[in-house]
């Protein structure tokens, strides 16, 4: 139980503090850049577009992705599952979660390979007139997919227990809608 609360706290921190601050910084970089360009006729933040495109936006997305999945913000088709009895609904949820795990596991594998190759080759990005390493930003991608796979494993365990008519002992996080089973 303590483990899941720590994972959920990490996801919340990444989304609320990490992604929220990236959104604020992205807004400030854009406002300062536009104000400098149109009012002062000078580029106040050299490479502002690359900063937003290659650093801030990817961090915002990949830090918010795990909590968006856990909170059920991804599109889902529930009409068929909602019309079923609870145990069959749990079985449908388990099958859907297995498919999700396969798809996101494949994403995780290719993303992890790409990130590893980027670290090995010291991949860089140009910001203004300087080149910075890109691997610190890329590390957020396998972290996000890993957290999502961890949550999918928990949901699969829960749905299998429900399909078998067993007690579900893991508490749900606040405002969690789960997989196909509510």
Image (spheres, rainbow, N blue to C red):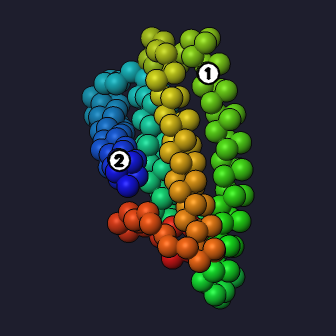
The location of residue 128, given as percent across then percent down, is 44, 17
Q: Is residue 151 left or right of residue 40?
A: right
Q: Is residue 143 left or right of residue 10?
A: right
**Residues at marks 1 and 2, CA–CA distance in whole angstroms:** 27 Å
Q: How many marks?
A: 2
Residue 152 drawn at (x, y percent): 57, 55
Q: Relative to 28, does residue 40 appear above or below in the rendering?
A: above
- Quadrant of residue 97 in the image? bottom right
Relative image position of residue 48 (x, y in whole percent) = 41, 28
* Mark 2 closeness class: few <14, some 14–19, many ≥20 residues within 10 Å: few
| Residue 78 visible from this viewpoint | no
Q: Which residue is mark 1?
A: 116
Tell me: 64 left or right of 80: left
Residue in the image at 65% along x and 26% along y: 114
In which quadrant of the rendered view does residue 180 lie? Answer: bottom right
Q: Residues within 10 Å of mark 1 (few under 14, many from 20)?
A: some
Q: Quadrant of residue 29?
A: top left
Residue named by callout 2:
6
SS of the residue under disc 2: helix
């Amino acid at each position: 139980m303590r483990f899941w609360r720590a994972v959920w706290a990490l996801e919340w921190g990444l989304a609320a503090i990490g992604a929220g601050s990236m959104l604020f910084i992205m807004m400030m970089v854009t406002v300062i850049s536009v104000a400098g360009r149109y009012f002062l006729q000078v580029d106040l933040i050299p490479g502002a577009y690359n900063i937003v495109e290659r650093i801030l936006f990817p961090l915002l997305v990949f830090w918010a992705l795990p909590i968006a999945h856990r909170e059920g913000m991804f599109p889902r088709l529930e009409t068929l599952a909602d019309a079923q009895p609870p145990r069959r609904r749990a079985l449908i949820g388990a099958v859907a979660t297995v498919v999700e795990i396969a798809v996101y596991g494949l994403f995780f594998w290719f993303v992890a390979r790409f990130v590893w190759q980027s670290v090995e080759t010291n991949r860089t990005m140009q910001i203004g007139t300087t080149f910075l390493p890109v691997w610190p930003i890329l590390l957020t991608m396998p972290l996000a997919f890993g957290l999502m796979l961890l949550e999918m494993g928990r949901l699969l365990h829960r749905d299998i227990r429900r399909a078998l008519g067993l007690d579900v002992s893991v508490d749900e996080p606040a405002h969690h809608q789960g997989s196909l089973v509510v």
